[in-house]
């Protein structure tokens, strides 16, 4: 079974062909990061326009790299939320047009389900499992008892983890997106700057990063008031230490409580080396199997959307041609 995946929820235009939900035949990603860099963030109107310019070629390229034509495609899986509405609409419109013109079934996929299913391109899922989803817009602990079934155990009450990384990076005058820069800088420093950990209520699986972000900004501000300098590498290491400790410990606690057979890491922040290493170490110590996708499948891509779409294909969960982009789409 061949699924054509399409992803345009943010600033990556991507199309992919995935076989049986597990084998990536192609995964073409046209990133706009360089364009948005000079604005210090994604500009929605610019993103939509670039998606329109890129979408047709990206789909053609994905088919050609897979050595397949539309005649071979069994279904088109497209991200329909959450994300920027003008960006989502470009992918949804393209998917609907092909579906209508060629009579190929249409499947609407939740973007975060896609991030989680990036893991299935690496290893078969074993239920129950706990997925830690950390991206530019989301920070969630998700319990899955079966394919396509998502129970949100906890989520961020303010900033997403990636958002916190990007804001702290901006305060340190690092380029956008800042996550990878903080990650690199953190390796050159020591976590000796005292920063808070937002554990929240003892039984809560929720997260909060705005207090930590403010603490970083205050530390910088107070130091400059006193005419002192703070080693940015130490500050980055301390910030990363605080973020990853809370993310990892809550994930481990959830995995134990729900007797998870697997822990999955998903979303753009899964590229973070500090987080990967810490989660690896803790899962090993607790004897929990951990799956982490390669970096190329952690950030936005259409292969993960096709992988999630394949489950819906098997369940016969198809969309009509009135499918619309839903910016605030919920997962459960
Ligand atoms: P969402 O998936 O919630 O809609 P998004 O698609 O914009 O948001 P992704 O593309 O999954 O998010 O991830 C982008 C985020 O990941 C950015 O905030 C970026 O800074 C962060 N990120 C990427 N690499 C790293 C890294 N090595 N360390 C920390 N953060 C990183
Ligand atoms: Mg992105
Ligand atoms: Fe994403």
Image (tube, rainbow, N blue to C red):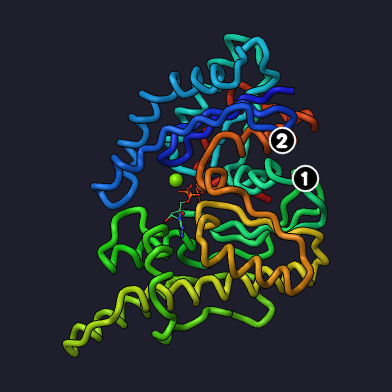
Q: Residues within 10 Å of mark 2 (few under 14, many from 20)?
A: many
Q: Is residue 23 left or right of residue 175?
A: right
Q: Is residue 56 left or right of residue 74?
A: left
Residue drawn at (34%, 30%), measured in percent from left and top?
A: 50
Residue drawn at (71%, 68%), measured in percent from left and top?
A: 283
Residue 124 is labelled as: 1
* Tags 1 and 2 touching, CB below 8 Å: yes
First-in-chain label (1 vs 2): 2
Q: Observer-nearest residue: 11 or 16?
A: 16
Q: Is residue 130 above or below residue 37?
A: below
Q: For the view shown, which residue lies furthest in the front direction?
A: 188
Spatial separation of the CA atoms under disc 1 and disc 2: 8 Å
Residue drawn at (31%, 74%), measured in percent from left and top?
A: 232
In the rendered image, residue 154, in percent from the top left (x then y), is placed at: 64, 65
Residue underneath mark 2:
22
Q: Secondary structure at mark 1?
A: loop
Residue 133 is labelled as: none
Please tell me in which quadrant of the rendered image residue 73 appears: top right
Label 1 near ligand 3 (CB < 8 Å): no
In the rendered image, residue 171, in percent from the top left (x then y), is placed at: 28, 68
Q: Is residue 214 visible?
A: no
Please tell me in which quadrant of the rendered image residue 120 appears: top right
Please tell me in which quadrant of the rendered image residue 246 appears: bottom right
Q: Is residue 80 above or below residue 65?
A: below
Q: Residues within 10 Å of mark 1 (few under 14, many from 20)?
A: few
């Amino acid at each position: 079974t061949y699924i054509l995946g399409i992803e345009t929820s943010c600033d990556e235009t991507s199309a992919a062909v995935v076989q049986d939900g597990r084998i990536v035949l192609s995964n073409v990603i046209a990133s706009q990061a360089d364009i948005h860099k000079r604005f210090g963030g994604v500009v929605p109107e610019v993103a939509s326009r670039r998606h329109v310019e890129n979408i047709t070629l990206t789909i053609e390229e994905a088919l050609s790299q897979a050595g397949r034509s539309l005649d071979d495609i069994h279904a088109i899986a497209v991200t329909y939320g959450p994300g920027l509405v003008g960006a989502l609409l470009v992918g949804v419109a393209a998917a609907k047009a092909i579906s209508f013109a060629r009579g190929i079934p249409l499947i609407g996929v939740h973007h975060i389900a896609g991030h989680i299913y990036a893991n299935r391109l690496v290893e078969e899922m074993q239920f129950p499992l706990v997925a830690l989803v950390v991206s530019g817009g989301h920070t969630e602990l998700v319990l899955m008892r079966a394919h396509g079934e998502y129970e949100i155990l906890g989520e961020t009450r303010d900033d997403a983890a990636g958002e916190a990384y990007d804001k702290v990076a901006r305060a340190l005058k690092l380029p956008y997106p800042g996550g990878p820069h903080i990650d690199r800088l953190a390796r050159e420093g020591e976590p000796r700057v005292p920063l808070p950990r937002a554990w929240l209520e003892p039984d809560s699986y929720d997260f909060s990063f705005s207090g930590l972000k403010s603490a970083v900004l205050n530390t910088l501000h107070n130091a400059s008031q006193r005419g002192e300098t703070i080693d940015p590498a130490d500050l980055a290491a301390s910030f990363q230490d605080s973020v990853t400790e809370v993310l990892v410990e809550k994930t481990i606690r959830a995995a134990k409580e729900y007797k998870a057979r697997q822990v999955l890491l998903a979303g753009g922040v899964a590229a973070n080396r500090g987080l990967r290493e810490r989660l690896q170490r803790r899962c090993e110590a607790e004897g929990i199997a951990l799956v982490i996708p390669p970096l190329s499948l952690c950030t936005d891509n259409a292969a993960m959307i096709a992988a999630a779409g394949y489950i819906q294909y098997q369940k016969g969960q198809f969309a009509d041609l009135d499918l619309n982009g839903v910016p605030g789409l919920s997962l459960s």
